[in-house]
Image (cartoon, rainbow, N blue to C red):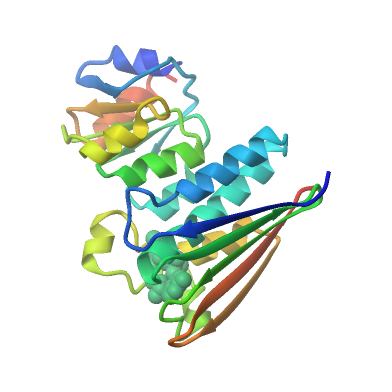
Amino acid sequence: MEDLHLEFTVVPDDFTRAGEVSGKVKKTLKDLGFPPLVVRRTAIAMYEAEINMVIHANGGKITVTINPDVITVVFADSGPGIPDIGLAMQEGWSTASEEIRDMGFGAGMGLPNIKKSSDYMDVQTELGVGTTITIKIFTNP
Amino acid sequence: MTTGDILKLDGITPSVYDEDKDVEKVFCCDLLSVAMARAPEGSAWVTVMTNANVVAVASLAEVACVVLAEGFDYDEAALKAARGKVTLLRSSDPVYETAAKIGALI
Ligand SMILES: Nc1ncnc2c1ncn2[C@@H]1O[C@H](COP(=O)(O)OP(=O)(O)OP(=O)(O)O)[C@@H](O)[C@H]1O
Ligand SMILES: [Mg+2]
């Protein structure tokens, strides 16, 4: 199989569509016959990163590369950036507003979930410029 | 046990119900990122959250159904998002009583 490239745009503040990209990629991986655990881990990581783009940044771009051995996903936004990534990676740390918390977000679990669900995670972030997160999920346990 | 068995319980009504699905566990949580990471596949997810994000998480986590407790009702956007995809039930009881009742069926 040749590498499969998929590109998506995430719209900011649109909660009715939040999770749509993750759902589409999940279906694609399922259809391609990847193991259920690989599909689930990708879906969890992607959902959290997608939602973070909707809530904390101004939307952004998701690029997925599917290879038989590894699934690579890049989440790029031009939002405010993350001031202290060490703090942001801690479970329970969140800057989500009251309004966002009322929707069920803001546990401060998203970034830790992404790390746990993927085999590799890299965060590049610059204040006022944006955040780019790259994750890899290896398909062979 | 299946979603159809849950529907037979007192105080449970369907909001979106397209097919009977196997239920293996009960899971209670209102924080979406916790549910996303921890809700077991094939579980009945009892919550008080009414919005469409619950449907997105339920679909991605592949729970068998969502059970909205406390007699609350789903948002219109949640119902719309769930049709043909995710089973949504309602319960007139609080979270604990709802979960205990479903758990007793397993
Ligand atoms: N793409 C992003 N751009 C800017 N800030 C971000 C971005 N992603 C995360 N953050 C910051 O990192 C914090 C922690 O993110 P994390 O996803 O772990 O928790 P959360 O989104 O606040 O809550 P949860 O994901 O549990 O609903 C956020 O509150 C926010 O301040
Ligand atoms: Mg988050």
Q: Describe residue A105's horizontal placement relative to residue A127 as left or right.
A: left
- Where is residue A72, by image quadrant? bottom right
Residue occupying image coordinates x 50% and y 40%: B61
Residue A108 can be seen, yes or no: no
Above or below, B35 relative to B91: below
The spot of residue B59 in percent (x, y) is 46, 37
The spot of residue A115 in percent (x, y) is 60, 64
Q: Nearer the viewer, residue A12 or A96?
A: A12
Residue A114 can be seen, yes or no: yes
Residue occupying image coordinates x 47% and y 80%: A87
The spot of residue B21 in percent (x, y) is 46, 19
Above or below, B99 relative to A98: above
Q: Quadrant of the C terminus of chain B?
A: top left
- Where is residue B17, by image quadrant? top left
Residue occupying image coordinates x 40% and y 25%: B84
The spot of residue A39 in percent (x, y) is 64, 43
Q: Describe residue A70's horizontal placement relative to residue A134 as left or right.
A: right
